[in-house]
């Protein structure tokens, strides 16, 4: 299946398009959530996660710009300008990531959700890394926000800022657990159990992806069938003799069948 979303754009892998679309959804959710929540620590978690997304979106713009057949067409007609502006560190411009989301919506309209899912699963080894990156960002963000809310009322809490929470979430996901930051409340420990469980699953998937990529032998290219040289008289004569022998054998078989039917009659 062709994996481009718009006519005239360079084809992109389905998994990559869905990854960028999912990041766009998360980014837009963060923009809305910033208007709703009044907790400065929760807001700082969102700002930090948005900071992680910025180089990914900027890299996506550069990738599309240098792989498109027409840079001018992509930049002006395919909303490349929106991709660039939404990658810059200006909160007011992040709403332009809706154009990235619109690109994925067009993808679903063009191919349908079922066909996209089949395509994604057929290349699941290639898409595993992108899926892990997205899920790690989700666990970092929501795990950090959850542990901050769980710990904010405890006088003994040592996870008291956005930086503490994201650091704790990351070392917990990776199952390193330095022990410098840890939850002291029951609800915080429940969040810790969920984050650790998610981390084991995510990095187990990543290990499987790397094993598949490193241990799977490269596919062998089919060898072209040998053909007689066009200007080699000996090769042409040998080929004609082979065809003549095959034709004579076919005629002999046909005569034998006719004689057998004649005897039966």
Image: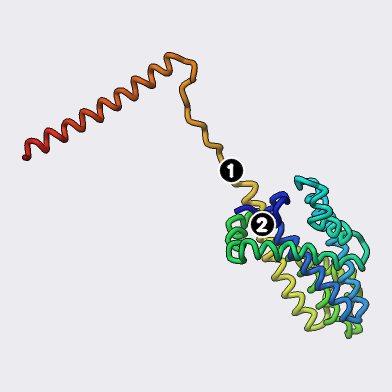
- Which residue is under mark 1? 217
- Residue 175 visible within the image: no
- Which residue is under mark 2? 14
Q: Residues within 10 Å of mark 2 (few under 14, many from 20)?
A: many
Decide if residue 142 is on the left or right side of residue 3: right
Residue 119 vs residue 244, the one in the foreground: 244
Q: Would you place residue 251 above or below residue 265 in this image? A: above
Q: Would you place residue 89 above or below residue 220 in this image? A: below
User: Which secondary structure lies at badge 1?
Assistant: loop
Q: Position of residue 145 (x, y in %)?
A: 83, 76
Q: Would you place residue 8 above or below residue 164 in this image? A: above
Q: Residues within 10 Å of mark 1 (few under 14, many from 20)?
A: few
Q: Which quadrant holds residue 38? A: bottom right
Quadrant where the C terminus sits is top left
Residue 102 vs residue 196, the one in the foreground: 102
Q: Residue furthest top?
A: 233
Residue 90 vs residue 194, the one in the foreground: 90
Decide if residue 59 is on the left or right side of residue 231: right
């Amino acid at each position: 299946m062709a994996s481009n979303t718009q006519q005239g754009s360079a084809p992109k892998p389905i998994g990559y398009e869905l990854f960028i679309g999912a990041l766009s959804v998360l980014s837009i959710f963060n923009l809305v959530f910033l208007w709703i929540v009044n907790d400065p620590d929760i807001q700082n978690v969102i700002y930090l996660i948005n900071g992680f997304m910025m180089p990914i979106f900027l890299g996506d713009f550069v990738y599309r710009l240098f792989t498109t057949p027409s840079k001018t067409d992509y930049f002006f007609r395919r909303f490349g300008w929106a991709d660039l502006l939404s990658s810059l560190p200006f909160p007011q411009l992040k709403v332009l990531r809706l154009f990235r989301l619109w690109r994925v919506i067009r993808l679903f309209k063009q191919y349908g959700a079922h066909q996209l899912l089949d395509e994604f699963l057929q290349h699941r080894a290639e898409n595993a890394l992108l899926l892990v990156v997205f899920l790690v960002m989700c666990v970092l963000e929501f795990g950090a926000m959850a542990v901050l809310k769980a710990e904010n009322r405890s006088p003994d809490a040592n996870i008291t800022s956005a930086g503490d929470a994201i650091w704790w979430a990351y070392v917990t996901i990776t199952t390193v657990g330095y022990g410098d930051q840890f939850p002291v409340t029951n609800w915080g420990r429940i969040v810790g159990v969920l984050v650790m469980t998610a981390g084991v699953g995510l990095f187990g998937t990543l290990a499987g992806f790397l094993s598949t990529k490193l241990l799977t032998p490269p596919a062998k290219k089919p060898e072209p069938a040998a053909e007689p040289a066009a200007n080699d008289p000996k090769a042409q004569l040998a080929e004609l003799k082979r065809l003549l022998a095959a034709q004579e054998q076919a005629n002999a078989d046909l005569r034998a069948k006719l004689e057998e039917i004649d005897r039966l009659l």
